[in-house]
Amino acid sequence: MLAIMKEKNAHQIAHVLIEALPYIQKFKGKTVVIKFGGNAMIDDALKQSFARDIVLMKLVGINPIVVHGGGPQIGDLLKRLGKTSEFVDGMRVTDSETMDVVEMVLGGLVNKEIVNMINMQGGKAVGLTGKDGNFIHARKINMTKAGATLEDAPEIIDLGHVGEVSSIDPAVVEMLGNSDFIPVIAPIGVGKDGHSYNINADLVAGKVAEVLKAEKLMLLTNIPGIMDKQGNLLTGLTLTDIDNLIADGTISDGMIPKTRCATDALKGGVTSVHIIDGRVDHAVLLELFTDQGVGTLLLRR
């Protein structure tokens, strides 16, 4: 019985490897940008499986670039310091004191933890923020809120050190990625004024993927992917499908900026975008190297 079980397991393992072979051949030498966030950044087992996925990608000739968030970790430290977090339409109001905490958490604690996890699995990860090599150029975001009546002037809301990507100089990332190193990027940019700006990690990942003409952009989330109104996973969508799903309300709330990031990346030259369930063990490998995948695949058409 033991011999039969071993033989059966051997056939299963062989099937998995054979299924992965054409994908490894297809993506060898290509760049894949992965936005690491959600539960995958909190659960210890998921963090370790993610690190192993990244190392394996590099070993088979794929060029992975990791961009990470860290909102919950920022909130936790601010709370411990006795500072209340204020949000406007999901964006953290970031004064100079808060920005110091953001840089410490994103560029220090979180970034170096991810770097260490990858290195412990045999990789050679290098942590970066947008300040390194003058990599991410940012501009300040100001929100405009409509007045209470048509006669009232719109209110301009100062979010502080909250920014968006104005441009990216990929030289330092290309230098690292084209060698044995794995870039791990914290979403902090620098403005023309020399000030630091906190930028949404999805947007940074999308812009990095655009500039590098990446083969894939992968966004890890806390949901299976994009769902229809009946709660079924939509496994393959085009730009036209996305516009229609937003228009009819299927895609709403927090998924709208994520899908807009995805569509902008596709329009900017990224071959495909994957919105995947980061709660699944080895989600990155399953999406890359299996026929079924674990999320929603987005293509230009």
Image (cartoon, rainbow, N blue to C red):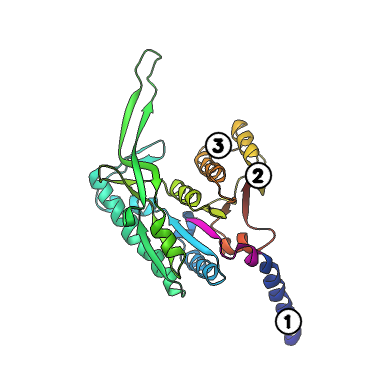
Q: Quadrant of the C terminus?
A: top right
Circle 2 — which element?
strand
Q: Which mark is residue 47?
A: none
Position of the N terminus, as image quadrant, is: bottom right
Mark 2 and mark 3 in contact? Answer it, CB < 8 Å.
Answer: no
- Count neighbours of disc 2 (C-alpha within 10 A) and say few if under 14, some if 14 to 19, many if 20 or more: some
Left or right of 14 on screen, residue 70: left
Q: Nearer the viewer, residue 132 or 52?
A: 132
Tell me how far mark 3 sits from mark 1, CA to CA. 47 Å
What residue is disc 1 on? 5
Tell me the mark number nearer the camera, choosing from 3 and 1: 3
Marks 2 and 3 sit apart, C-alpha to C-alpha, by 16 Å
Of all residues, the one furthest to the top in this rendering is 151
Left or right of 42? Residue 94 is: left
Circle nearer the viewer, 2 or 3: 2
10 Å crowding of disc 1: few (<14), some (14-19), many (20+): few
Residue at 60 percent across and 31 percent down: it is 247
Is 279 a magenta residue? no
Q: Earlier in the sequence, mark 3 or mark 1?
A: 1
Residue plotted at (39% across, 15% down) = 149
The residue tagged 2 is: 237
Left-right relation of 152 to 96: right
Question: Mark 1 or 2 closer to N-term?
Answer: 1
Q: Give the amino acid type for the residue marked by disc 2 in the picture.
A: Leu
Q: Can you identify the residue that label 3 sits on?
A: 252
Q: Residues within 10 Å of mark 3 (few under 14, many from 20)?
A: few
